[in-house]
Image (cartoon, helix red, strand yellow):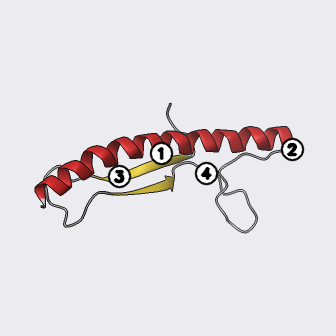
Amino acid sequence: MSTYSLDLSFTDDRNNALPHPPRAWVYVKAFSLQSKDGRPLVTPDCLCMEEMEFEINRLQRELEEIRKTAREKFHSEEARWFEGNS
């Protein structure tokens, strides 16, 4: 599953150049600036609770996909980083 609104940024250490273990962040990759005060919105306008539930569920699915990807990346990178720096 690819994500629409959120994604994972992950620093790996393919060349053993990082002075620290791998790091990761969740970032907003798609949003609209529709609020009056300029805040980024990660859902479209929801006109009823069913629409809001749908959008919340979508964001939760995205976060679960990001968690799965992060686990895989951390697992492989941490093992390699700690082997090379011990």
Task: Between label 3 and label 4, give the one nearer the viewer.
Answer: 3
Q: Position of residue 13 (x, y in %)?
A: 20, 53
- The local secondary structure at tag 1 comes to helix
Of all residues, the one furthest to the top in this rendering is 1
Image quadrant holding the C terminus, namely bottom left
Q: Nearer the viewer, mark 3 or mark 1?
A: 1
The percent position of residue 35, horizontal first and vertical second, equals 74, 61
Residue position marked by numbered label 4 in the rendering: 31
Q: Determine contact: label 3, label 4, CB under 8 Å.
A: no
- What's the mark number on residue 47? 2
Q: Amino acid at mark 1?
A: Arg
Label 1: how many Cα within 10 Å (few below 14, some 14–19, many 20+): some
Count neighbours of disc 4 (C-alpha within 10 A) and say few if under 14, some if 14 to 19, many if 20 or more.
some
Does label 3 or label 4 sit earlier along the sequence?
3
Give the mark, 1 or 2, whose residue is nearer the N terminus.
Answer: 2
Q: Is residue 81 left or right of residue 32?
A: left
Q: What element does badge 4 sit on?
A: loop
Give the CA distance from mark 4 to mark 1: 20 Å
Earlier-in-chain disc, 2 versus 4:
4
The reply to whether the C-beta atoms of the residues labelled 2 and 3 are less than 8 Å apart is no
Going from the N terminus, do you reach mark 3 or mark 1 first? 3
What's the residue at 41%, 41% (across, down)? 69
Q: Secondary structure at mark 2?
A: loop
